Each structure stands twice: as C-alpha cells, then as structure tokens.
C-alpha cells in the first residue's frame, strides 16, 4: 500500500483513496483496499510562513551584505527577537576584519546571549561562506543579568 503525504502550512487530515478499478456499481459502500493519502484543510487563521530556500545564492562578504543577513536573521530566527513578548534584542555589525566578524548585542533575548551568538554565527556562515568566525564585540555583552540590558 502506498502513502502520499503533502506538506504545507495547513493542517493535514487523513482520507483514503480508492483506485477506480476496484469500484463496483453493485457494492459502492464496501471497504476497499486503497492508498492512504492526506487532504489539506485550510484553517480560518493564516500564519505567515518564512522559509529560507536551499537555492539562495551565497553572498560576498561586505558590510552591506552582513547587515542584510543580520536583518534576514531577525526575521528567520524570530523567536530570538520577538518584541510581542517583551524580547527586544538587537544585533548590529560592530566590526569586519577580513573573514572575522564582530557583532554587538543590545536589549533582552529569550535565549542566553551565547546561544544567540552561536545561532547568528551559523546563519551568517551559511549565507556568507567566506566568514570564518563570528565573535562578540565585548565579552560583557554575553552577561545575561538584567543589569546588562
């Protein structure tokens, strides 16, 4: 028995699909062996879906591109920068020195600041492969205590 699965941002509800060759006019409600498939049913609420396509071309390492990617990261990694729940973290480019990038953190983050830096480093390296290292401008910026915001 084959199964089909269609993925989308809508929820899935299983249904059965019966091959037309097994349908009979004399027994329309008899159970048939068919394939399991899923149909999509749209919710009344729509949620924006943000995805990064695998086809995105790598960018050259320039200050403008790094700032663009940091802006993209804010959208893509929205859970790190969610103002709706009081997380007002901001990330800025502090310095570009060859393949080494230094960033500046301001405000509160949902995750530990070291986690934010690690995720941003991964995201930046994926989009700009020339980057060898992403570091924080000042180690004090990794302090998660409330006095630091």
Image (cartoon, rainbow, N blue to C red):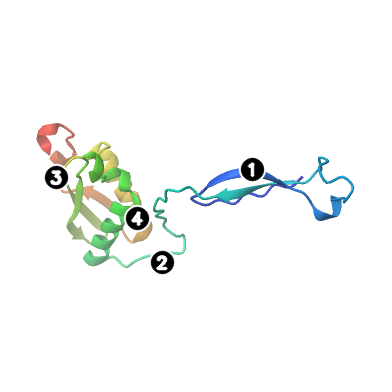
**Label 4 secondary element:** helix
Which quadrant does the N terminus fall into? top right
Figure check: 109 above or below 9: above
State the separation of the CA atoms marked 2 and 4: 13 Å
* Callout in the foreground (3, 2): 2
Rendered location of residue 90, percent (x, y): 19, 49
Q: Earlier in the sequence, mark 4 or mark 3?
A: 4
Rendered location of residue 32, percent (x, y): 81, 43
Q: Which of marks 1 and 2 is nearer the N terminus?
A: 1
* Callout in the foreground (2, 4): 2
Quadrant in which residue 60 is drawn:
bottom left
Mark 4 and mark 3 in contact? Answer it, CB < 8 Å: no
Residue sticking out furthest to the left: 147
> Which residue corresponds to mark 1?
14
Rendered location of residue 7, percent (x, y): 55, 51
> Which residue corresponds to mark 3?
138
Which quadrant does the C terminus fall into? top left
> Which residue corresponds to mark 2?
57
* Callout in the foreground (1, 3): 1
């Amino acid at each position: 028995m084959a199964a089909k699965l269609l993925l989308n941002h809508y929820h899935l509800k299983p249904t059965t699909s019966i091959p037309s060759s097994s349908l009979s006019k004399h027994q329309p409600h008899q159970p048939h062996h068919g394939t399991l498939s899923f149909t999509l049913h749209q919710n009344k609420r729509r949620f924006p879906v943000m995805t990064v396509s695998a086809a995105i071309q790598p960018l050259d390492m320039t200050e403008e591109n790094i700032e663009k990617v940091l802006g993209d990261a804010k959208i893509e990694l929205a859970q790190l920068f969610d103002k709706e729940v009081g997380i007002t973290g901001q990330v800025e480019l502090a310095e570009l020195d060859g393949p080494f990038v230094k960033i500046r953190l301001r405000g509160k983050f949902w995750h530990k600041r070291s986690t934010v830096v690690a995720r941003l480093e991964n995201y930046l390296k994926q989009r700009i492969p020339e980057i060898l290292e992403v570091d924080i401008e000042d180690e004090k910026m990794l302090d998660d205590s409330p006095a630091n915001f």
